[in-house]
Image (cartoon, rainbow, N blue to C red):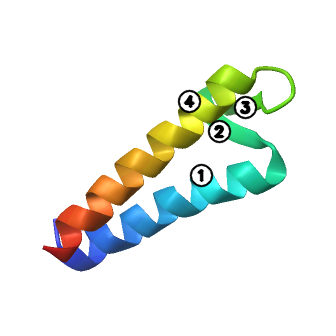
Amino acid sequence: MSPRFMTLLGVIIIAVAVWGLLRGRILAGARGLRSNYYYKNDNPFSFYGFVLIYLSIGSFILYQSLL
């Protein structure tokens, strides 16, 4: 894939994680056309786990695209 696309993808994934931290809910998958979310108050372990996963994947993709 092109470095420009990889950079854009990394930035979008990191933005999803930051937006989730600000809103208090993080996208955790989908069933059909319905999105599933983890909420900070309901399930904090899964919420912060998904935030960490999004941040690590996004930063890895961004790092690889800038090499």
Spot occupied by residue 15 in the image (x, y as percentages of width and height): 57, 63
Q: Mark 3: which amino acid? A: Tyr
> Which numbered dot is residue 27?
2
Q: Nearer the viewer, mark 3 or mark 4?
A: 4
Q: Amino acid at mark 1?
A: Ala
Image mark for residue 17: 1
Secondary structure of the residue carrying tag 2 is: strand
Amino acid at dot 2: Leu
Sequence-earlier tag: 2 or 1: 1
Answer few, some or many: residues within 10 Å of disc 3's Cα (few below 14, many 20 plus, some between 14 and 19).
some
What residue do we see at 65% from left, 38% from top?
27
In space, the residues marked 2 and 4 are separated at their CA atoms by 11 Å
Contact flag, marks 2 and 4 (Cβ < 8 Å): no
First along the sequence among labels 4 and 1: 1
Cα separation between marks 3 and 1: 12 Å
12, 1: nearer the viewer: 12
Name the residue carrying label 4.
Answer: 49
Query: Which residue occupies 59% across, 52% down?
Result: 17
Separation of residues labelled 3 and 4 (CA atoms): 12 Å
Closer to the N terminus: mark 2 or mark 4?
2
Are dots 3 and 2 in contact, CB under 8 Å?
yes
| First in residue order: circle 3 vs circle 1 | 1
Per the image, the residue denoted by label 3 is 37
Marks 4 and 1 sit apart, C-alpha to C-alpha, by: 11 Å
Distance CA(mark 2)–CA(mark 1): 9 Å
Q: How many marks?
A: 4
**Identity of the amino acid at label 4?**
Gly
Say few, some or many: other residues with alpha carbon within 10 Å of mark 2 (under 14 / 14 to 19 / 20 or more): some
How would you rate the neighbour count of disc 1 (Cα within 10 Å): few for under 14, some for 14-19, many for 20 or more? many
